[in-house]
Amino acid sequence: MAGPLAGIRIIELAGIGPGPFCGMMLADMGAEVIRVDRAQINPVAAIGHGVLFRNRRSIALDLKHADGRDALLDLVASADGLIEGYRPGVTERLGVGPDACLARNPKLVYGRMTGWGQQGPLAQVAGHDINYIALGGALHAMGRAGEKPAIPLNLVGDFGGGGMLLAYGMVCALLSAQRTGAGQVIDAAMIDGTSLLMAMFHDLQHQGLFSDQRGTHMLDSGAPYYEVYETADGHWIALGSIEPQFYALLCQLLELPADQFAAQNDVASWPAQKQALTALFKTRSREQWCELLEGTDVCFAPVLSLAEMPDHPHHRARSAFVEVGGQRQPAPAPRFSATPAGTPQPAQPPGTHTRDVLADWGFDAQRIDQLLASGGAHQR
């Protein structure tokens, strides 16, 4: 694979959500990421993971089988990193926890992805994104005034505060291992990642600029100039005219009455201003508003659906989407000038590459045959 992480070898113990997202990010950047799958993947767990499983070869090992466990430890011996997303203690019980793996490879970076972290009263409790962002303070802050908190898909806990945090941690620890020759264990918890993503709002609250009253602040739909509005054809547009010069341009292009809109940050004026803008934006179609405002410093964008967005001229100009296995999907990001990422390869069923991977990682043919015969490994 091309990319800045070319030459790095990562073992990914199969999971769902943030773990595969981390694996995808590392693989997109050129790391050789080997997914260690079960022989039969849970069909429910596979839903929505086709893109997240891209760019990796898959081997199927039975980690409850002594031969499968020993095979994994032998792979660990020549790996740079390992990522897993089990509850705390599971890999230890399987015999492939941090102590066992670091004993085989002291330079290994062992990345652990959980919701609640490796310790604490909730460490062993089941949870999902919505629970982590609830306890992390993010969910309470999202939504409109007088309404219940708004659920931001599973972007904040699973992906931003989870998989991306682990990918960052892996790269940091890999750099450290290259300098020091010593590996380490990464405790990446979605509850911690969520709290970290809320850093600016903790600061604003400390300064008295952000309260617990959701839907009343500049960034949470309180301000009329940072809001989404419906258009005449039932679509939506988004404004983000925060800076005074951008707000002034908005007022100019929309020909807003100065007596009503002169005071940008007079909170008492916000409801009336928002009511006026709501009525105004319903007088034209989304396309008409795009013709007037898109490409200006008003900070404007149409609210596009998943089906619409890849065809927007800006995405097309940046080649932001690629077709992989007949499916259009986001291209690897970020972009690198000297070591650009290659074209992603489509996800493959569990165990597709068992023989090839084991051979490439130094297993001889007799050992591979023995593993497959014993049930420690499976080849699709």
Image (cartoon, rainbow, N blue to C red):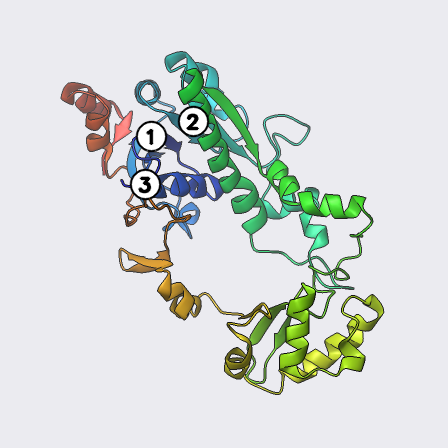
Residue at position x 47%, y 26% in the image: 173
Assess whether mark 2 and mark 3 are in contact (beta carbons under 8 angstroms). no
Q: Which of marks 3 and 2 is nearer the N terminus?
A: 3
Residue at the outermost front position:
245
Alpha-carbon span between mark 3 and mark 1: 10 Å
Q: Mark 2 points at which residue?
A: 174
Q: Identify the image quadrant of the N terminus.
A: top left
Name the residue nearer the viewer: 284 or 45. 284
The part of the image, by quadrant, that contains residue 311 is bottom left
Q: Earlier in the sequence, mark 3 or mark 1?
A: 3
Name the residue nearer the viewer: 257 or 68. 257
In the rendered image, residue 281, in percent from the top left (x then y), is placed at 63, 81
Q: Name the residue under label 1.
A: 8
Residue type of the residue flagged with mark 2:
Leu
The part of the image, by quadrant, that contains residue 251 is bottom right
User: Does residue 226 show up?
Assistant: no
Alpha-carbon span between mark 1 and mark 2: 9 Å
Mark 2 surroundings within 10 Å by alpha-carbon count, few (fewer than 14), some (14 through 19), many (20 or more) = many
In the rendered image, residue 206, in percent from the top left (x then y), is placed at 80, 43
Residue at position x 26%, y 55% in the image: 325
In the rendered image of this protein, does residue 232 appear above or below residue 363? below
Tell me the number on the disc at residue 3: 3
